[in-house]
Image (cartoon, helix red, strand yellow):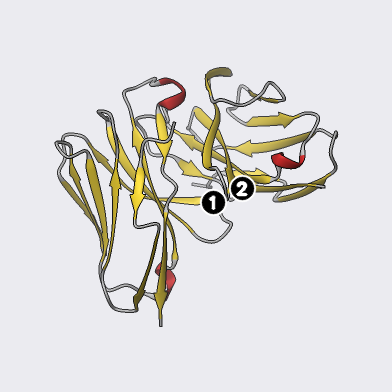
Amino acid sequence: KAGVTQTPRYLIKTRGQQVTLSCSPISGHRSVSWYQQTPGQGLQFLFEYFSETQRNKGNFPGRFSGRQFSNSRSEMNVSTLELGDSALYLCASSLEDRSTDTQYFGPGTRLTVL
Amino acid sequence: SQQGEEDPQALSIQEGENATMNCSYKTSINNLQWYRQNSGRGLVHLILIRSNEREKHSGRLRVTLDTSKKSSSLLITASRAADTASYFCATGLYSGGGADGLTFGKGTHLIIQP
């Protein structure tokens, strides 16, 4: 089975711009979660999608949003980028529920905001 | 809130030695998962141990879980240079556990000296 894929792998943007990141989960996985990883804050949960619905959301401002399509692929969007949004964004998929099932992570998208 | 907390924060050992990392947590859990991350890449799932299990093995990895002490340990035997990475524990709550359904610690950075 193909693993979780994320595109693009690297991205450089300037403050005020917006960005869209894409994630394709493992075939058959219905839960897709997004995380932000920074040296200072570590791994922080952004949101989880299941059956095209946002099931859980972490403590991030409304500039961070996402969606899931009928084929379970997911996108996340960050609007009005700030310098502090520079991070590694990780997508993970699991069969049904990130709390109880193994999560499989993609390689991440490295976002740099200048 | 970050429930899992790894100890030590960093560990440096000689190749061939055993490495032990610990994880402590605060509330009752459904499962505890260990992940490895090589520099700047996605996380790789190592082992998931459920709350009714006490010990699990996978190759050179041994994980123990003590729910009475709310702690877990990851043992890597006969370490190799390729084991150099950051290791994270993640505590999973009950199904549909909300935003805190799965929380990651800040990780232990393991360095294997040749």
Q: Quadrant location of residue B71? A: top left
Which residue sits at x=36%, y=34%?
A: A101
> In the rendered image of this protein, does residue B72 appear above or below residue A20?
below
Q: Residue A44, percent across and down?
A: 53, 37
Q: Are marks 2 and 1 in contact (CB under 8 Å)?
A: yes
Pick the front one: B51 or A105: B51
> In the rendered image of this protein, does residue B27 appear above or below residue A11?
above
Q: Residue A5, percent across and down?
A: 61, 45
Q: Mark 1 sits on what residue?
A: B42
Asked if residue B13 lies left or right of residue A83, the reply is left
| Label 2: chain letter | A
Q: Quadrant location of residue A90? A: top right
Do the residues indicated by labels 2 and 1 lie within the same chain of the protein?
no
Which residue sits at x=34%, y=79%?
A: B15
| Label 1: chain letter | B
Q: Residues within 10 Å of mark 1 (few under 14, many from 20)?
A: many
CA gap, disc 2 and disc 1: 6 Å
Pick the front one: A40 or B103: A40
Asked if residue B106 lies left or right of residue B76, the reply is right
Q: Quadrant location of residue B12? A: bottom left
Pick the front one: A5 or B31: B31
Question: Which residue occupies the extreme bottom position in the image?
Answer: B114
Secondary structure state at the residue bearing disc 1: loop
Q: Mark 2 sits on what residue?
A: A108
